[in-house]
């Protein structure tokens, strides 16, 4: 017993004189494991024994809110933890360090409260609540994340939050009256710690203390959402959500404005939307870009697109194709559909009930041949005994546009005309086969080139290359989000009742691999300003 007391005293004495160290739970990229470190940052400190926090009690809370105690195993400089299950989870715990006193100051009880988020944890699950006396909570606002200090269920104002950025740099943030810091800048795995002092007297191990110093820590990935990046950065791709997965087909995988048979992809892959950690390779098809995917009846549809015929290092020779196919996840096979009446690319494809609708686009006919702009939309009734494409005249000629479906109406947004980019919005009512005009997109004509669109909660949502996300509310566009990474020729897909997934695209002359989940602001809610 004497030896134990001497060891404890030595440990506390060392803690008073050593640089500040904190307990962090650091999940790995797979989300299957985590390491607990006692350090100044998210890396283990070889000079500090991990035994100092070996008494840590950890709990895992799954997406359904169920808590499960976790075991940890001591390794050389960390505690190894296995994280059961998949999907979004929260890991949290407490370790009481002991009673300390610095000089003539009040003796205090020192306690660490590490917490980590694994994946895109829903807002109502990111707060542990009364399981911790104080905690840092990430709050997503229109694509950006702020940190909130909560103690006893109430926000704490005026606290200094110490931030460890993904590149290892350290900064300090201050909580406002609402307990929130400024938005975190950048993407990647962030660490944070803060001191919260509770005036509370007590006794531990025969030593009295007059206050408790709580050190909540947090590890959270920002902009990485728990969904893995695309296996290859790609733009002008096809993407859709279907049967709980995100599907991605083809696209442009090289330098902007360069085309050959090695740059345009023939790959087809998917990842689970709820906690998926790896992309599953599926049977591919033709090398193609400049098309989209649609989903209907649990199947994935593809029609048209552009493919190069030239080998690497030879002059560009691009042609549009008319191929149309459907993929059945149950059989894992593609099946042929009636081809488009004419080759078409740089268009969009959506499903409206039992009908596929292709809008906009042009026909590229190869090197030295003039491209023809399409002036009809095409409709394929999948419920027909012998489906065939029906043409509906378009009141426009545009490509690099986006389409979204609300009820029986197809909203065709932005894009490029023969005279340049255009913010125009046209609406096709499939019941009447009549077109009408919607309010033009906000911003500049240039910003309307190659937007991405989908419908969430019965309303059209659009992301433009300038970064903002707009939602059409009646006849008015309102900003409801901001992409962390500005991009064009990407894809936007619904993700639950109040969020979207932004996939692929091009930014600054290079393609984007990041898969970004953005929560949409409520009407009247403040949207974080653009960086």
Image (cartoon, rainbow, N blue to C red):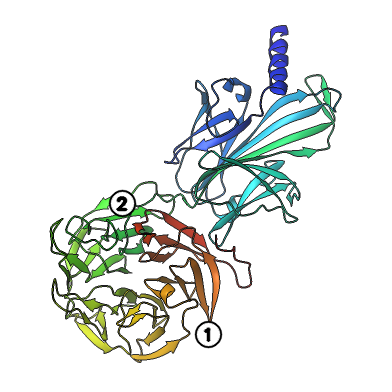
Report the disc number at residue 475: 1
Q: Earlier in the sequence, mark 2 or mark 1?
A: 2
Q: Are marks 2 and 1 in contact (CB under 8 Å)?
A: no
Res. 498 in view = no
- Please say if 282 is above or below 21: below
Residue 448: image quadrant is bottom left
Element at badge 2?
A: loop
- Please say if 10 is above or below 418: above
For the C terminus, the quadrant is bottom right
Query: Which residue is painted at 34% across and 86% down in the image?
Result: 430
Closer to us: 297 or 126: 126
Query: Which residue is painted at 63% across and 49% down in the image?
Result: 137
> Relative to 458, is 264 on the left or the right?
left
Mark 2 or 1, closer to the camera: 2
For the N terminus, the quadrant is top right
Closer to us: 22 or 285: 22
The residue pinned by badge 2 equals 232
Residue 195: percent from the left, percent from the top? 72, 38
């Amino acid at each position: 017993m004497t030896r134990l007391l001497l060891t404890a005293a030595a440990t506390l004495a060392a803690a008073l004189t050593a640089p500040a160290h904190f307990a962090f739970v650091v999940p790995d990229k797979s989300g299957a494991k985590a390491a607990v470190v006692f350090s100044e940052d998210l890396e283990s400190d070889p000079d500090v024994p991990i035994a100092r926090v070996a008494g840590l009690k950890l709990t895992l809370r799954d997406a359904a809110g169920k808590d499960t105690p976790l075991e940890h195993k001591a390794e050389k400089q960390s505690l190894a933890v296995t994280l059961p299950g998949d999907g979004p989870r929260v890991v949290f715990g407490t370790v009481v360090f002991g009673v300390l006193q610095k000089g003539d100051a009040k003796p205090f009880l020192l306690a660490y409260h590490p917490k980590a988020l694994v994946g895109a944890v829903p807002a109502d699950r990111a707060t542990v609540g009364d399981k911790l006396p104080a905690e840092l909570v990430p709050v997503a606002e229109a694509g950006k994340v702020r940190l909130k200090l909560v103690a006893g269920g109430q926000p704490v104002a005026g606290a200094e939050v110490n931030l460890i950025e993904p590149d290892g740099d350290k900064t300090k943030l201050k909580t406002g009256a609402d307990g929130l810091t400024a938005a975190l800048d950048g993407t990647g795995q962030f660490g944070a710690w803060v001191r919260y002092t509770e005036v509370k007297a007590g006794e531990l191990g025969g030593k009295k203390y007059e206050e408790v110093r709580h050190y909540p820590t947090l590890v959270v990935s920002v902009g990485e959402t728990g969904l893995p990046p695309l296996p290859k950065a790609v733009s002008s791709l096809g993407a859709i959500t279907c049967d709980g997965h995100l599907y991605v087909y083809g696209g442009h995988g090289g330098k902007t404005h360069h085309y050959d048979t090695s740059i345009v992809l023939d790959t087809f892959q998917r990842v689970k939307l709820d906690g998926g950690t790896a992309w599953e390779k599926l049977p591919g098809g033709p090398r193609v870009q400049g098309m989209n995917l649609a989903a209907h009846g649990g199947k994935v549809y593809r029609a048209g697109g552009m493919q190069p015929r030239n080998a690497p290092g030879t002059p560009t020779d691009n042609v549009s194709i008319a191929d149309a196919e459907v993929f059945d996840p149950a059989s894992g096979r593609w099946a042929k559909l009636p081809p488009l009446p004419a080759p078409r690319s740089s268009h969009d494809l959506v499903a409206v009930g039992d009908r596929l609708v292709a809008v906009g686009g042009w026909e590229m006919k190869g090197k030295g041949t003039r491209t023809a702009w399409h002036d009809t939309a095409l409709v394929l009734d999948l419920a027909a005994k012998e489906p065939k494409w029906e043409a509906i005249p378009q009141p426009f000629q545009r490509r690099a546009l986006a389409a979204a479906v609300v009820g029986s109406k197809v909203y065709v947004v932005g894009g490029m005309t023969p005279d340049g980019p255009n913010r125009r919005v046209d609406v096709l009512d499939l019941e009447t086969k009549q077109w009408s005009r919607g309010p033009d997109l906000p911003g500049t004509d240039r910003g309307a080139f190659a937007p991405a669109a989908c419908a969430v909660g019965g309303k059209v949502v659009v992301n433009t290359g300038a970064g903002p996300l707009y939602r059409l509310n009646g006849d008015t566009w309102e900003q409801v989000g901001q992409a962390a990474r500005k991009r064009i020729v990407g894809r936007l897909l619904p993700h639950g009742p109040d969020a979207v997934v932004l996939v692929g695209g091009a930014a600054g002359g290079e393609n984007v691999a990041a898969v970004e989940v953005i929560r949409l602001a409520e009407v009247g809610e403040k949207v974080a300003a653009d960086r």
